Image: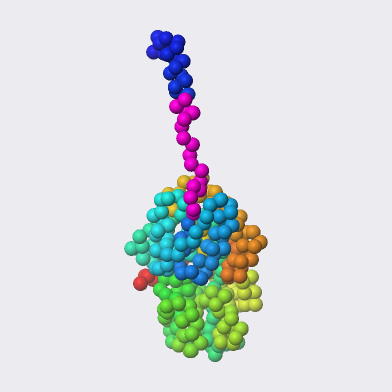
Amino acid sequence: MASQLPRRTVLALGMAAAGTAWAQPKAPAWPSKPVRILVGFPGGSTPDLTARTIAEPLSRALGQPVVVENKPGAGGNIAADLLAKATDEHTIGVLINGNMTIAKLLNPATPFDPLKDLAPLSLIGTAPLLLAAAAAAPGRNAQEFFAAAREAGNKWSYGTPGVGTVGHIGMELLKTKGGIDPVHVPYPGNPQVINAMIGGQIQLALLPPGLAAPQIRAGKLKAIGVTSSGRSSLAPEFPSLNESGVTRDFQLEIWNAAAAPASLPRPIAAKLSALIADIVRTPDVRAKLFQQGWQVAGTSAEGLANRIKADTALLGEVIRTRNIKAE
């Protein structure tokens, strides 16, 4: 017992213990090396442009280089899987909504579970889709077009950039909401969808406004309405489908977001979440994202988590009722 030890020994033990406590290493500062942003699409794609827009201001804020790495394939799921499995505490991703919501519902063999393996950081930007038709499509307005579509039934067809895309699932939802029944025709991408519509092979499609608007202004396509609840700042000249009275309470958006591995320590995730939300709301970055076709959100991690939950429920119900399976 200490009371039985010589006073000098007790003092020596005390000083040794104190020295041990003083010598405990501090946790290393974060970040301690460059941070990488994984993107599941090629250079020049919308997610790639978004990632590169936030990379420079994020690098300044963190005091470390921020490098964008493109890992295209599987609709962005290759990058999402790499992100889910990253353990270096210096990897984040810019993902699209399909990667963070319905990936596992569309294909049970998907090697990651977005709800379990990914940590939401911030919803970056959102955009509605624009329901477009061939220029020669019948009807002077949305009401008349939908009347013609109902009469045509499954004699009409719609195009998408693939099975399980938001354009596909969204149109299946619109079929229920609007009482129409066109047949799905998948294409390699939206440019091919637009060409098919212009050529008369298909009658309609849900497209990003930035792709559809130039064709509409050139008289090659016809705008039926946007899928936002009201008019969108991205395409204010086009009424919403709700506004035209062909649907009620119909809202569908595409979005992109910053995410991290679920294993990332919470203090680091919280720091990144706050930084990214602040960055995307700065005037300069906001303007760049708007030019890329995004309505800036810049939410908290909780705000993104709520959006993931809502969209998973909405789109998941369509996947189940329509028995949609990714190819």
Residue 205 lies, with reference to residue 287, above or below; the image says below
Q: Which quadrant of the structure image shows residue 181? A: bottom left
Residue at 59% in and 87% down: 219
Query: In the current view of this chain or complex, which residue is farthest to the right?
Result: 283
Q: Is residue 295 above or below residue 237?
A: above
Horizontal and vertical percent position of residue 107: 36, 65
Q: Residue at x 54, y 63 (%)?
A: 52
State the image coordinates of residue 89 (x, y, percent, origin top left). Answer: 45, 50
User: Foreground: 212 or 61?
Assistant: 61
Res. 231 image quadrant:
bottom right
Badge count: 0
Considering depth in this image, is 222 or 54 the residue closer to the camera? 54
- Residue 46 can be seen, yes or no: yes
Please identify the quadrant where the N terminus is shown.
top left
- The region drawn magenta spans 19-35
Q: Where does residue 128 sit, x and y in percent of width and height? A: 56, 70
Residue at image point 49% right, 28% down: 22
Q: Main secondary structure of the magenta part?
A: loop
Question: Does residue 30 belong to the magenta stretch?
Answer: yes
Image colouring: rainbow
